Image (cartoon, helix red, strand yellow):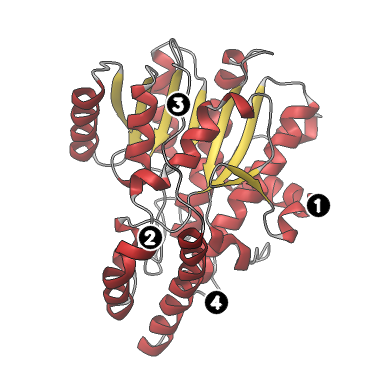
Amino acid sequence: MSLLSVALAALWLYCIGLGVALRQLLRPRRAAAPVFPLQHGKVAIVTGGSGGIGYHTAKHLARLDMHVIIAGNCENEGQEAVRKIKEETLNEKVEFIHCDLASMKSIQQFVQQFGVKNCPLHVLVNNAGVMLVPERKTEDGFEEHFGVNYLGHFLLTNLLLDMLKQSGTHSLNARVISVSSAVHYVGELHLNDLQSRYSYSPHGAYAQSKLALVLFTYRLQHLLTAEGSSVTANVVDPGVVDTDLYRHVFWAVRMVKWITSWLFFKTAEEGASTSIYAAVSPELEGVGGTYLYNEQRTKSVDVSYDEELQRKLWTESCKMVGISDISRCL
């Protein structure tokens, strides 16, 4: 891909973000963050909880007295996040467990380590992700956006599903929250080329991975409802947030972002608000299969409601990560 093409692709993605940012700017800011009930005895896992949106999600859940496990691929950053959260929230029930979403082996080891704790699991926040990285593959040979943002969370969720089902009750459901993006509105799912082997572009691969998370959430909720599980699945859009995910964009776009971010972009703490809402709000008790933006139920892109596409993606994803397709049993 030429330098000009890379620049145009990055500018295209930034313009989409700028449109969302303008919508954020025009929407009145909330006077104060909502007060949620304490979550005594509840356990949450937050992927990518060492920084950005994930860190503030983990910190707020810890402040609500949850036992929080940060899942991440950097031990030093993870332990530092744990130290800071403990210090700021006075909650000692915060810990880090290594989990590299670019490695199926690492995901399986994480689930085994968590299982040894013999504790319940009430909330899973699929937050970690990469954006606009150069063309490269995960340890298992998957295109990195699709492998980390989507397939890693698909496998992690499925491996933790039994624990979530055992922890949820009819009156207090366990919850799965996946962090997507407004970019999913322009994403295309290429079932015949999910790895972008024939035509790779960072913005296209990123948008596809975020669309896949929406399709996955809706399919997961359909399966959970069909078997009567006390688990709900929702997908959130944090808005346009000033995080270090933009480090891979073209330098000119980074410059524009640096100049305009104070006006248009949410802080990472503000970006975490919808994830926190989805994780603990009583308003969402028993509610699943929704797309949430600014703590409001919002319509996702039309194609995301295509049940046949949801089913095909789920089946193909099971094959890719080597797990049985539970939908065939229903």
Residue at mark 2 to residue at mark 3: CA–CA distance: 24 Å
Q: Which mark is residue 308?
A: 1
Camera-side residue: 41 or 157?
Answer: 41
Q: Nearer the viewer, mark 3 or mark 1?
A: 3
Q: Residue at x 34, y 58 (%)?
A: 245
Q: Where residue 89 appears, x then y in whole percent?
A: 26, 23
Q: Which residue is mark 4?
A: 199
Q: Which mark is residue 35?
A: 3
Q: Nearer the viewer, mark 1 or mark 4?
A: 1
Q: Residue at x 32, y 38 (%)?
A: 55
Residue at mark 4 to residue at mark 2: CA–CA distance: 31 Å
Task: Pick whichever of labels 1 and 2 is earlier in the sequence.
Answer: 2
Residue at mark 4 to residue at mark 3: CA–CA distance: 47 Å
Is 220 drawn above or below residue 316 in the view shown? above
Residue at mark 3 to residue at mark 1: CA–CA distance: 39 Å
Amino acid type, callout 4: Ser
Q: Residue at x 38, y 83 (%)?
A: 7
Q: Secondary structure at mark 2?
A: loop
Camera-side residue: 125 or 327?
Answer: 125
Q: Secondary structure at mark 3?
A: loop
Amino acid type, callout 1: Glu
Amino acid type, callout 2: Phe
The quadrant the C terminus occupies is top right
Q: Residues within 10 Å of mark 2 (few under 14, many from 20)?
A: many
Q: Where residue 21 appears, x then y in whole percent?
A: 46, 64
Q: Residues within 10 Å of mark 1 (few under 14, many from 20)?
A: few
Left or right of residue 168, residue 265 in this image: left
Left or right of residue 197, residue 53 in this image: left
